[in-house]
Image (cartoon, rainbow, N blue to C red):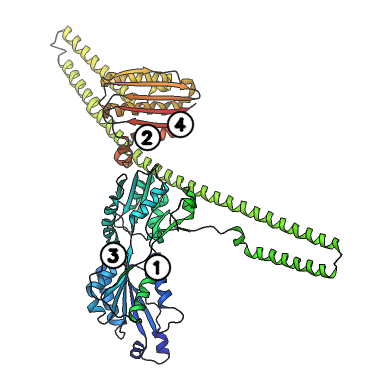
Amino acid sequence: MKYFLSLLLCLYAAGISPAFASQAKHHIFVLHSYHNGIKWVEDVNQGIFKVLLAKDRNDLELHIEYLDAMRQDGAKSLATLRHLISSRYKDIVFDAVIGVDDIAIDLLVQYHVDLFADAQFFYCGKVGAEPLEDYHEPGFSGVVENVNIPATIASGLDLYPETVKVVVVNDHTVDGRRLQPLLDAARHDFPGIIFEYVDGLSMAKVVERLGRLTGNELVLLVNFTTDGLGETYSYDRSAWLIASRCKVPILTMWDFYLGSGVLGGLMISGEAQGERVARLVIDQIWGQSHDFSGQVLTTANTFSFDYNKMKWFDVSYSDLPKGSIVTEEPQSVLWKYKKFGWSILGIALALETTVIILSVLMYRSKKAEAELEKHRNHLEELVEQRTFELSNANDQLIGEINERKKVEAALLESEEVLHQLSNNLLTVQENERQRISAELHDELGQSLAALKLQLRGVAGGLGDEPVDVLLQECEDLRSSINDIIENVRRLSRDLSPVLLDDLGIDAALEYLVNNFCRLSGIEAEVNLIEINHLFAQNYQRMLYRIVQESLNNMGKYAQASHFELTIEKRSSRIFLVVKDNGKGFNVDNVLAQVSAERGMGLTAMAERVRILRGTLDVESATGKGTTIMVTVPV
């Protein structure tokens, strides 16, 4: 809690009692829903100060308190406020009380009789829309936020007419819940647009989801100060995190988000809200009208856009709605170096004065006049040259800053992918160990146990069984031993393809396909060229694993009866294609899943292709099979 502008200290120092001071001045109490330091709160205070603390107004005293509802429990804040008013303000009679934002307004509606019995009540920052309605509380007057979501979305669609989807970011806080009906109503104004809601998620998952957006999509940032894990964020930090990996424009309806990664929209101004409610207080308490039946006003919204994001998303000034405001505009070189310009201008004026004086004193001295003119032209050339150099330096600096932002965004994305790959790798290693352990126990262990029993039977029959029976049993033992040897070889081939190391990828792929067809019963059509001489052994191993992973996925999920494996060389690139006639899948849905949910198959394949400096394309549809195409340079 913070006690602002305590003029009572001055009154005490002058020997004036608090009771006399409260009678001599009008006292106004401002109650904020959130904490000081938030740009919205500071903007509202700035508007209130501009009106109530004007230079020619010294007949009032302003008191400000903050509920800090974004970070603290509302019931605890209420108990603290009750105690604060009963102790700190017990000798003060308030003429007016202003509630800022819905939580403080709701609190005053419920408890204003107990807390401020004799005060007139005002509010600002309440979520509203056309048509404006009264707050339905006698004696309350105030200013609502005319949140115009359709106009903001329409401005984005005008800038990007190819848009097909709007991704809405909202939370379940008090503000988020009260804005939800406005969002639902706005959807009906755009029947051809898909609306996707991103709520109930952690901040990390929201950032990850928005980082996957590409193409004809926009983001509408409504309110996200508390994520699905209960973590709270300030408005600017929330906007920066959301915009950190988002590659599409972000629209919003509040100007405090500008400068934090959003492009723009039809904005509500906190300063305008504070200034409007302050003028309402002045009009009703010091004005001619004393009708407190409840006035409801609003402030005019303005289209505002961030200059840096306009450059980032290639938006020109002519594309903006009429009357738009552009923030963060860079100062011109002449304005930035205005002192230097004034100096040059002063020099030029001095030279002109000198020329006039010399012209009067030396009317016929053409030589001196020509020399002075030459000198002036030289100075102008120097100014133009310096201006051109500074302009080039400024453009180069802007380009370097933009390039650095792109590199930082790419590094963050790579770091996240590497982290997920590391986690998935540990999981795959553990699963592979469990599989090998199960195969050793279930196959080799049981086979050896059976072999042991057979040996015991042979040993027991050495004295009684005929020789031909014993020979047959020995033959069975030899067959069992061959099966065990074959299982050991199979396990060894699965762990590391020896054939790849000995004969190269051509022979290894042929054996891999034949063995897969024999075990799975799936027919194959194979068209391979020799590529042993095109790749080093480590690259051959990666190509082998890509084909092996494709076949494994086909055997597990595709339910295919036939597939084609093709390797061909075009120009300086190798094309590897695996195509089956299985049940297929929705590629967008699978890629939209987080890595932990969709497994490591596609992720590992993509990482191997990236190491090979190639490209990976997956084409599939339900009931239409799957095609995996890998292109690798040679």
**Residue 610's quadrant in the figure?**
top left
Q: Is residue 257 above or below residue 88?
A: above
> Closest to the observer: 536 or 399?
399
Q: Which residue is mark 4?
A: 612
Q: Earlier in the sequence, mark 2 or mark 3?
A: 3
Which of the numbered marks, if any, corresponds to residue 132?
3
The answer to the question of whether label 4 and label 3 lie on touching residues, with beta carbons closer than 8 A, is: no
Residue type at mark 3? Answer: Leu
Foreground label between 4 and 3: 3
Task: Give the residue displayed 38% in from the left and 32% down from the top.
Answer: 605
- Could you tell me which secondary element the residue under label 3 belongs to? loop
Q: Which residue is mark 2?
A: 604
Q: Which residue is mark 1?
A: 272
Residue type at mark 2? Answer: Ala
Task: Give the residue displayed 43% in from the left and 47% down from the top.
Answer: 412
Q: Is residue 562 above or below residue 351?
A: above
